[in-house]
Image: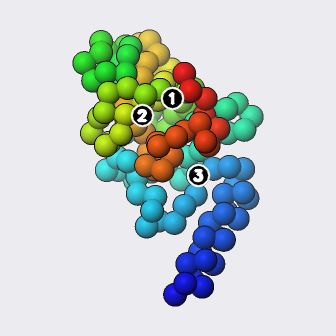
């Protein structure tokens, strides 16, 4: 059993390197932060430094990283890019990570990580995976 786990970890690491840095982890440890299925691709692209990932559209964007911050806009598409991340109020995703993006409608703003289909290990420190802090 131990050898199988080591093999799975090696394959996962190889997959992550072979996909240009796209997020990849064993299914048992990479449950999506939101209830819907994650997009097939979710990761920081080296050419633009943006996080490209599925989300729970329609999603409300806020001017700040508080749940009661004024609404700035909305994501209406279920696959979007996120420019940076910040720490804010803890939300339903069980962490305090918020992602900043351009809106499909309205002004740019922050969305709680619970609506972005990143795994919890990514949300813990997005900078470790190439996404800049806002």
Query: Is 22 placed left or right of 53 in the picture?
Result: right
Residue 85: mark in rendering: 1
Q: Is residue 129 above or below residue 87?
A: below
Residue at 61%, 77% in the rendered image: 6
Q: Nearer the viewer, residue 90 or 105?
A: 90
Q: Nearer the viewer, residue 99 or 81?
A: 99
Q: Secondary structure at mark 1?
A: strand
Q: Is residue 32 above or below residue 127?
A: below
Residue 58 screen position, x and y as percent: 34, 31
**From this viewpoint, is residue 102 visible?**
yes
Q: Earlier in the sequence, mark 2 or mark 1?
A: 1
Residue 97: mark in rendering: 2
**From this viewpoint, is residue 104 visible?**
no
Q: Which residue position is annotated with label 3?
A: 23
Q: Are marks 2 and 1 in contact (CB under 8 Å)?
A: yes
Q: Earlier in the sequence, mark 3 or mark 2?
A: 3
Residue 84 screen position, x and y as percent: 55, 27
Q: Secondary structure at mark 3?
A: loop
Query: Is 107 placed left or right of 66 in the picture?
Result: right
Q: Secondary structure at mark 2?
A: strand
Residue 126 screen position, x and y as percent: 54, 39
């Amino acid at each position: 059993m131990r050898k199988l786990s080591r093999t799975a970890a090696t394959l996962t690491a190889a997959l992550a390197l072979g996909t240009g840095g796209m997020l990849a982890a064993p299914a048992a440890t990479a449950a999506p932060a939101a209830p819907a299925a994650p997009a097939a691709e979710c990761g920081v692209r080296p050419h633009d430094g943006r996080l490209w990932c599925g989300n729970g559209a329609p999603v409300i964007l806020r001017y700040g990283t508080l749940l009661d911050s004024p609404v700035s806009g909305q994501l209406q598409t279920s696959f979007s890019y996120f420019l940076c991340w910040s720490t804010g109020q803890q939300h339903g995703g069980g962490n305090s990570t918020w992602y900043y993006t351009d809106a499909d409608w309205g002004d740019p703003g922050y969305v709680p990580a619970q609506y972005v289909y990143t795994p919890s290990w990514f949300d813990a420190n997005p900078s470790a995976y190439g996404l800049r802090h806002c």
